[in-house]
Amino acid sequence: MACHRRKAASPAWGTLYVIVAVGLGGLALGETFAPDARLRLIADGVGVLLLFGGMRLWVGLNRARLALGNDSPCCTSRLTVRVIERAAVVENDADEPELVAEATWRSTAGRVT
C-alpha cells in the first residue's frame, strides 16, 4: 500500500526567502555606504539582529505547518525510548558515599510515573 500525504498547508517558504534576501541586502548596503568603521560595525550588528529576529518570527508563525509537514497517518512508525536511571551520590553520617536513585521512570499506557 502506498503512503499518501495529507493535504496540509505548507510553510510560507517564500516569506523566509524574502526575509533572508532583504537581510543580506541590508548587510551589503551597510558595508557599502557606512563611512566610518564604528558605524559599519553598528549597522552590521543591528542587521544581524534584525535578520535573526525575522527568521525567529517566521519559525514561530509557521511552527504548526512545519510540524505537520511530514505527518501522515499511514506512514507512522513506533518510537522506542530507553530511559536510564541516574544515581546521585549522597553523603551520610558515616562519611561513606551512598548511591541513591533520583527518579524511576516507567512508561505505562502513555503516562510517566
Image (cartoon, grey):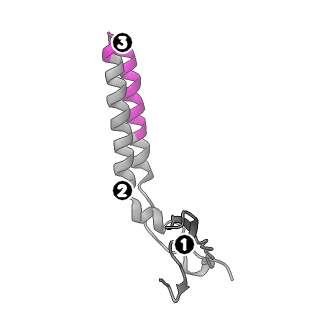
Q: Nearer the viewer, residue 90 or 74?
A: 90
Marker count (numbered) = 3
Reply yes or no: does residue 76 show up in magenta: no
Of callouts 3 and 2, which one flags the residue occurring earlier in the amino acid sequence? 3
Q: Residue at x 58, y 72 (%)?
A: 85
Of callouts 2 and 1, which one flags the residue occurring earlier in the amino acid sequence? 2
Circle 1 sits on which residue?
Answer: 100
**Local secondary structure at mark 1:** strand
Q: Quadrant of residue 53?
A: top left
Identified by mark 1, the residue type is Val
Residues under labels 2 and 1: Cα distance? 41 Å
- Residue range in magenta is 20-39
Q: Residue at x 40, y 61 (%)?
A: 63
Circle 3 sits on which residue?
Answer: 37
Is most of the magenta stretch helix, strand or loop? helix
Q: Residue at x 46, y 62 (%)?
A: 66
Q: Quadrant of the N terminus?
A: bottom right
